[in-house]
Amino acid sequence: MFWFILSGAKACEYPKPMTALSGTRPRRDILELTTGFLVLAALAALLALAVLGRSHGGAEGYTLRAVFSQIDGLSVGSDVRLAGITVGHVTSEKVDPKNFRAEVTFTVRDGIALPTDSAAIVTSDSLLGGKYIALSPGGDEKNLTPGAVVAQTQGAISLEQLLSKFIFSVTDSLDKSRKAATP
């Protein structure tokens, strides 16, 4: 509409389309259209890689189970690490209706033999990072067999609970020092 006003054209007149003989407008349209399709194809490819890259391609290795009091933030597909190296993934989570504890099934890569007194600990990458299971191998001569339960576990530590304990301990200390200071 602004083109009509600037060009001085009447309201009922429309600009004449350019042809290949009169200008380069159709070639430019084709170039813009092709570029748009290439950008959309690239975005679709990146989206597919992001979605497919998150799956871990099944359960390679052998399966172990562990029972935790809390697994806040741990999810199916989370890493299982030994000495900081990913050696497996969490394959399932469920709540035991009898004792209300979280049962986690995970895989460990073949060739890694864990002693029977090994521990499984739910920990996080960083303060705001995702959770994973850290395996701490024990010193027993016997090894866990596929499907065995890791007996020694430590559940997730809640950052909110730690902060609230710290705040309450500080306020409690301040209250005690104020009471001791007043005669």
Image (cartoon, grey):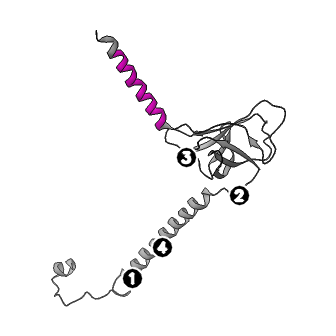
Where residue 25 sits, quadrant-wise, is bottom left
Q: Position of residue 64 (x, y in %)?
A: 74, 46
Residue 24 visible in this rendered orientation of the protein:
no
Q: Could you tell me the amino acid type at mark 2?
A: Gly
Question: Which residue position is annotated with label 2?
Answer: 58
Give SS at disc 4: helix
Q: Could you tell me the amino acid type at mark 3?
A: Gly
Decide which of 179, 54 is in the foreground and name it. 179
Q: Are marks 2 and 3 in contact (CB under 8 Å)?
A: no
Q: Left of 82 or right of it: where is 54?
A: left
Q: Are marks 2 and 1 in contact (CB under 8 Å)?
A: no
Question: Which residue position is annotated with label 1?
Answer: 26
Give the spatial CA distance, label 1 vs label 3.
54 Å
The mark lying in front, picked from 2 and 1, is 2
Q: Mark 4 or mark 1: which comes first in sequence?
A: 1
Give SS at disc 1: helix
